[in-house]
Amino acid sequence: MAKKYQVNMQVRIINRIMKILIRLGLMPAGMYLLTTRGRKSSKLYTTPVNLIIDDDRRWLVSPYGEVGWVHNARAAGQVTLSRGGKTEVVGVEELEPEEAAPISKAYLEQNSFPRQFVEIPYDAPLEEFVKIVPNHPVFRFVPQ
């Protein structure tokens, strides 16, 4: 059984430190700040994320499930990515489970911390990932 992701004081402190390092461009290449506009509040929310990058294609995986940025990204159809002083607004498109499964699997192979929040082992067969994608959405970035 997967552990439920909770934003506690420790997570807030780690995220705050990561935000500073990402803004300075001091984190690994796939780490970005994701900013979404609240679908109800219209406030801006920023969280560190780790993208899957393959040549010029990029994806965003939600290993922690249906968190706030997922709902906001769906509602807006776009997000803002920032890193090292550069900012870009990009469109997002949610993938169907069959297309998202290999991306989710690759994400968990590359990132060990989120594995505890996913219902299956990271080395499970692709068919198992198809089943859990609805709980862990995957988005493709599309040109604006």
Image: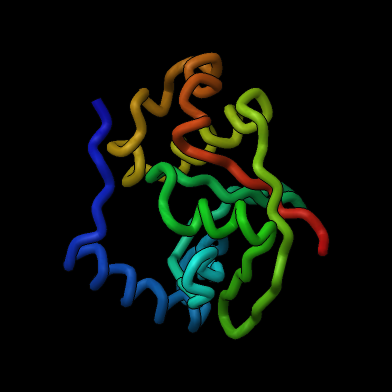
Query: Is 28 left or right of 122, judged from the image as shown?
Result: right
Quarter occupied by the N terminus: top left
Residue at 25% x, 41% y is: 4
| Relative to 85, residue 76 above or below | above
Residue 79 placement: quadrant:
bottom right
Q: Residue furthest left?
A: 9
Determine if residue 44 is in view. yes
Residue 32 in sight in this render: no
Locate residue 79 relative to residue 12 in the image: left or right.
right
| Picture layout, residue 13 above or below residue 116 | below
| Along the viewing direction, whichever of 122 and 37 lies nearer the viewer | 37
**Which image quarter is the C terminus in?**
bottom right
In this rendering, position of residue 131 left or right of residue 120: right
For the image shown, how many numbered marks are present on the structure?
0
- Scheme by which the image is coloured: rainbow
Residue at image x 54%, y 18%? 126
Q: Position of residue 36 (x, y in %)?
A: 55, 67
Q: What residue sits 32% from the left and 76% below the top?
A: 17
Q: Is residue 80 above or below residue 59?
A: below
Picture coordinates of residue 71 (x, y %)? 52, 53
- Of residues 104 and 46, the one drawn nearer to the viewer in this rendering: 46
